[in-house]
């Protein structure tokens, strides 16, 4: 029989995977991996400012990731330097400023390792409810804006010509990423959030012919990674967050091999 803490960890992890992986598909399609990394790194600064302002780390993370994500949207449009340069500067600056701020806050005891790499096995009932609530809101919002967001991802100008408010859709998407980072922080940690966003989506790409199918498959692979990572963590006493990411990576490797084999067989059948 599973312990209560392990059941809570499973529920919270699966909830995060179900919402993070479909969102991660857009990060993969848009080639915005560094964008996700930057918003995740901003979370640590959000933790520091949340504790400093007395509003709590989760709300601080949400507000800071929203601010940084919106700032990124603006800077990527107006900056005179390359986009990846802007992302790199903000990513490392936010992480470093967060670490320095926490170092000055000597009156606050902070589990830095827990924030950086997650502590899913310490998830409580309130955390589970927060994950479920956040996941429901994000999935409902994603469903509502799915078609315009896909259209804007494929071709922004064409989407605009078809009447899509591209800026509004992208702002809503950024807000959803911020929610995911905030609720996933305790599951896989700030440094590993982007991995859960990207790896299952990348693994699902080779088996998908439509955006909807890729979103569903990526969510399934993300859930499989959470289950496998948590069971491996319990079996070998390894850190839960990194174990989930390792499981996701192994799934990606296997899926890539299967997809490559399938392509070889299909080409052979077409040529034969």
Image: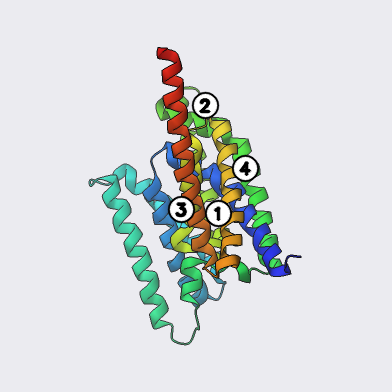
Please tell me how crowded label 1 is: few (under 14), some (14-19), or many (20+) other residues with Cα within 10 Å. Answer: many
Q: Earlier in the sequence, mark 2 or mark 4?
A: 4
Q: Nearer the viewer, mark 2 or mark 4?
A: 2
Task: Identify the residue at horizontal 52%, vertical 34% (top origin).
Answer: 149
- Estimate the spatial distance between the alpha carbons at disc 2 and disc 4, rounded to whole Å: 23 Å
Q: Which residue is mark 2?
A: 209
Judge left or right: residue 147 versus residue 37. right
The mark nearer the N terminus, 4 or 1, is: 4
Q: Position of residue 137 (x, y in %)?
A: 65, 49
**Which residue was labeled with disc 1?**
180
Query: Does label 2 or label 1 sit earlier along the sequence?
Result: 1
| Front tag of 4 and 1 | 1
Residue 211 vertical placement versus 50 (above, below): above
Label 2–label 4 contact, CB within 8 A: no
Question: Mark 2 Cα within 10 Å, few/some/many (few <14, many 20+)?
Answer: few
Above or below, 181 against 82 in this view is: below
């Amino acid at each position: 029989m599973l312990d209560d803490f392990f059941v809570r960890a499973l529920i919270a992890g699966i909830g995060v995977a179900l919402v993070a992986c479909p969102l991660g598909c857009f990060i993969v399609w848009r080639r915005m991996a560094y964008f996700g990394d930057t918003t995740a790194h901003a979370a640590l600064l959000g933790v520091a400012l949340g504790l400093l302002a007395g509003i709590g780390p989760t709300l601080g993370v949400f507000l800071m990731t929203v601010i940084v994500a919106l700032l990124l949207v603006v800077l990527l449009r107006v900056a005179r330097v390359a986009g990846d340069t802007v992302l790199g500067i903000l990513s490392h600056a936010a992480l470093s400023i967060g670490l320095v701020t926490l170092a000055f806050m000597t009156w606050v005891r902070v589990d830095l390792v827990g924030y950086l790499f997650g502590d899913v096995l310490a998830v409580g009932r309130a955390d589970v409810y927060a994950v479920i609530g956040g996941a429901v809101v994000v999935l409902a919002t994603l469903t509502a804006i799915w078609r315009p967001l896909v259209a804007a991802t494929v071709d922004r100008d064409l989407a605009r010509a078809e009447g899509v408010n591209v800026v509004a859709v992208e702002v809503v998407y950024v807000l959803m990423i911020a929610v995911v980072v905030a609720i996933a922080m305790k599951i896989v940690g700030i440094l590993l959030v982007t991995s859960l966003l990207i790896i299952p989506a990348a693994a699902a790409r080779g088996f998908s012919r439509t955006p909807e199918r890729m979103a569903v498959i990526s969510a399934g692979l993300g859930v499989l990674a959470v289950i496998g990572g948590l069971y491996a963590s319990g079996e070998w006493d390894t850190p839960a967050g990194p174990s989930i990411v390792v499981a996701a990576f192994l799934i990606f490797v296997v899926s890539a091999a299967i997809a490559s084999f399938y392509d070889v067989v299909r080409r052979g059948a077409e040529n034969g």
